Image (spheres, rainbow, N blue to C red):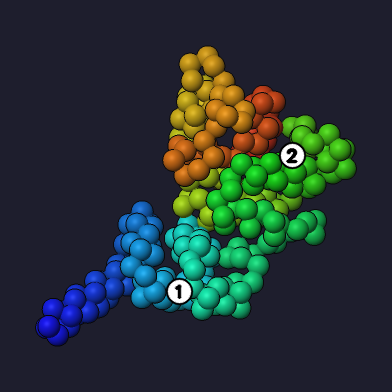
Amino acid sequence: MNEPTNSAVSDASIDLAAIRSKLKTAPEKTQLKLMQQLSEIGEAGLNVIKESLQEQRDKPPSAVQGKAYQLLLNSNSSAIAEFLATEFPTGLVPERSENNIDYSELQKLLAKQEFQSADKLTLQKLCENAGPDAVQRKWLYFTEVDKIPVTDLQTIDTLWRVYSEGKFGFSVQREIWLGVGKNWEKMWPKINWKEGNIWTRYPGGFTWDLSAPRGHLPLSNQLRGVRVIEKLLTHPAWE
């Protein structure tokens, strides 16, 4: 009776060791899948995720780290909850701001993948950076985008990228836009903002989870024409 049990433990150990090794060398997409697999193993898998997060903590936050943090956040382990509260009390991404703007709620929403609420809050934070007129109006003029500091736009973008497995964010949209030669009519279908001559209707037409195409979010005043997003995608934050 003991022999199968010992064998099973040995196989599990080998699997965890192999996964731990792959996490250090595999491409990002593979690492994301491995993180998901680890979370499904149980406590042993969660501990490997925890170790990986600890090892990477001095590096800039990445989509893989974001996935690791989210999986730990969603676990039912009191020990893991204590670890996160101690080591990452405000989340994974440093909330840097030249305007002393608080991004903690945005970080919480994105960490929980509550993308629709995060999208609304993102516009609010952009308006806060742009000034009191934009805050009162609740949307941006394209001429106000230049008022947003580099640091703040990079913080917002990093939060979106890290907690979306690298799928969402202004820098992701910029990459797609440059990839189609800055042709908006080619870009809109790629990010599912337009199909044929029909614009995607807000909010029901948009996809508020990771099944959305790359670059689908955030919306960045999508309903107010091209000039705001063009200013965002040509902002000095990306230089």
Mark 2 surroundings within 10 Å by alpha-carbon count, few (fewer than 14), some (14 through 19), many (20 or more): many
| Residue at the spot 39% in from the left edge and 65% down from the top edge | 39
* 11 left or right of 39 in image: left
Counting from the top left corner in percent of width and height, residue 198 is at: 54, 16
Vertical placement of residue 86 versus 32, above or below: below
Mark 2 or 1, nearer chain start: 1
| Residue at the spot 64% in from the left edge and 33% down from the top edge | 229
Mark 1 surroundings within 10 Å by alpha-carbon count, few (fewer than 14), some (14 through 19), many (20 or more): some
Counting from the top left corner in percent of width and height, residue 132 is at: 88, 43
Vertical placement of residue 161 versus 185, above or below: below
Tag 1 residue: 50
- Closer to the eye: label 2 or 1: 1
Residue 145, which numbered label?
2
Residue at the top extreme, as displayed: 197
Vertical placement of residue 138 versus 152, above or below: above
For the residue marked with disc 1, what is the amino acid? Lys
Q: Quadrant of the N terminus?
A: bottom left
Q: Examine the image and state in which quarter residue 218 appears.
A: top right
Q: Secondary structure at mark 2?
A: helix
Counting from the top left corner in percent of width and height, residue 223 is at: 66, 26
Residue at the front extreme, as displayed: 1
For the residue marked with disc 2, what is the amino acid? Val
Q: Examine the image and state in which quarter residue 24 appears.
A: bottom left
Q: Nearer the viewer, residue 55 or 83?
A: 83
